[in-house]
Image: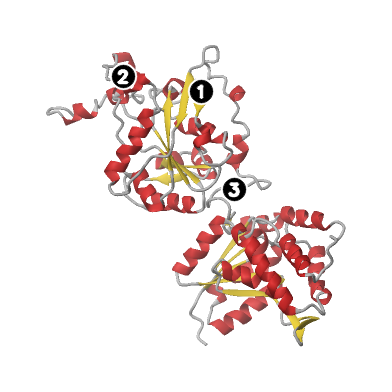
Amino acid sequence: MTRTREAAFFDLDRTLLGGASGPVITEALRGAGVIPDRPIPGENLVYRLFDVVGETLPSMLLTRQAARLAGGWDRAVVQEAGEVVAERLADDVLPYARLLIDEHHAAGRLVVMATTSPYDLVAPLAKAIGIDHVIATRYGEREGAYDGTVDGHFVWGPGKLAAARDWAADNGVDVARSWAYSDSIYDLPLLSAVAHPTAVNPDPRLRVIAAVRRWPSMHFDVPAGVPKVAGVEPQRALQILAQPALFPWARFDIQGTERIPHDGPLILVGNHRSYFDPLAIGFTIAKVGRPLRFLGKKEVFDAPIVGQIATAMGGIRVDRGTGSDEPLKAAAEALDAGEAVAIMPQGTIPRGRAFYDPELTGRWGAAKLAKMTKAPVIPVGLWGTERVWPRSSRFPNVTNITDPPTVRIRVGPPVDLKYRSLDADTRRMMAAIVDLLPAAARRHREPTAEEIARALPPGATDPGTPEDRRRPGTD
């Protein structure tokens, strides 16, 4: 058979899943009556250790002996236990793994689960999550019962690569052109054999190898580019620091956080008054305890240090000059993974007189994203952030601790969108935001020259209000 196809090989434990499948498999086997009801002493400790450090030689030696211990088990009973495993673990497959499986399918590649676990216990799970083939350890069988041997390769280390090559030869796949994803240093043979290796939630030794060989490293529970340290992403760690005492130069008046769902896809839309706005929204959602992905201008991501931080926080880069839909696609992918995404529909902070215009005008991006995903849209009204970080300043005013300004944040109910007109839905979002602002925000007034200056970036001139720019003779 001519090898023309490509495949994507996914490990199971600590890769497709966040931890070990062992506890669920053991429980299913106990439920099927093939192993004793009483737990083995230290069993839970072994699984917890695996979740933290991954595979070890002692644990894999025990796994290798499992075939002998399974001798005499009724295979049909174990296969039924495998169906139970699939029911319990299918929803635990990490969100970005599911999206990546879909991407490989869309590219015409075969998707394969490659795991040391027994075939009969994991094949139903692979089918449940849309994986095409399974390479797993198969137990020898005689007259419907396991005979205590391994039939073929023990799918671990070099044995996993050998099993993958045998499968590839039978299915017209070129391993050398393929993809592989694993957490374990013991999968180094397979990772080294493919064109596109990726270390997923890597154990300490694989993390070093991946860095030396410049392999991509990622986690399937957070967007690409977001690192994790000791299993925690940076934004989660910073949320612990979102305490008023640590911001003595600002006070926060926050209401309505009970309207923010604790999980599931979510679009937060807010008005834009200051570079402090993202921090204010981040401070707000920290009270709910979930991470937030911001769409931000490319200039933020291109800036030294700040850009790396923005990427590490899961930010989504927007280059408005290109008109590309890629940022919206990335945001839609995050929403498909159950993330919360924040957008400032105004796009940029208004300048000069326009800063004081009570009529807020938004761009279509948020409405288009909502129409694409049908994710709920929650409005956030911000007021006072410009006093913490004025438009005219390159840095926030962190010295004002004797009389700090109050940042007023209000979270509203979901916006009732119709998905028929992007213009109309954008107006609905902006109106919902305005309704959350204080009465002063809705009054027309002529700002003073000093106020106009504070609402301009350093060195900029006043472009006027939208009405001014529509008059003849204005720029």
From the viewer's perspective, is 181 left or right of 106?
A: right
Q: Nearer the viewer, mark 1 or mark 2?
A: 1
Name above or below for residue 324 compared with residue 101: above
Residue depicted at 55% across the width and 42% down the height: 262
Query: Would residue 173 be visible to someone looking at this image?
Result: yes
Q: Nearer the viewer, residue 287 or 62?
A: 287
**Which circle's residue, 3 or 1, is located before the other in the chain?**
3
Residue 280 percent location from the top left of the image: 49, 30
From the viewer's perspective, is 357 left or right of 337?
A: left
Helix, strand or loop under label 1? strand
Query: Would residue 115 be visible to someone looking at this image?
Result: no
- State the image quarter where residue 453 is shown: top left
Helix, strand or loop under label 3? loop
Separation of marks 3 and 2 at Cα, in angstroms: 41 Å
> Which disc number belongs to residue 253?
1
> Which disc number belongs to residue 227?
3
Number of callouts: 3
Separation of marks 1 and 2 at Cα, in angstroms: 26 Å
Q: Nearer the viewer, mark 3 or mark 1?
A: 1
Helix, strand or loop under label 2? helix
Q: Amino acid at mark 3?
A: Pro
Q: Amino acid at mark 2?
A: Ile
Separation of marks 3 and 1 at Cα, in angstroms: 32 Å
> Which disc number belongs to residue 452?
2
Residue depicted at 52% across the width and 38% down the height: 305
Residue 16 percent location from the top left of the image: 61, 61
> Which disc number belongs to residue 189?
none
**Which circle's residue, 1 or 2, is located before the other in the chain?**
1
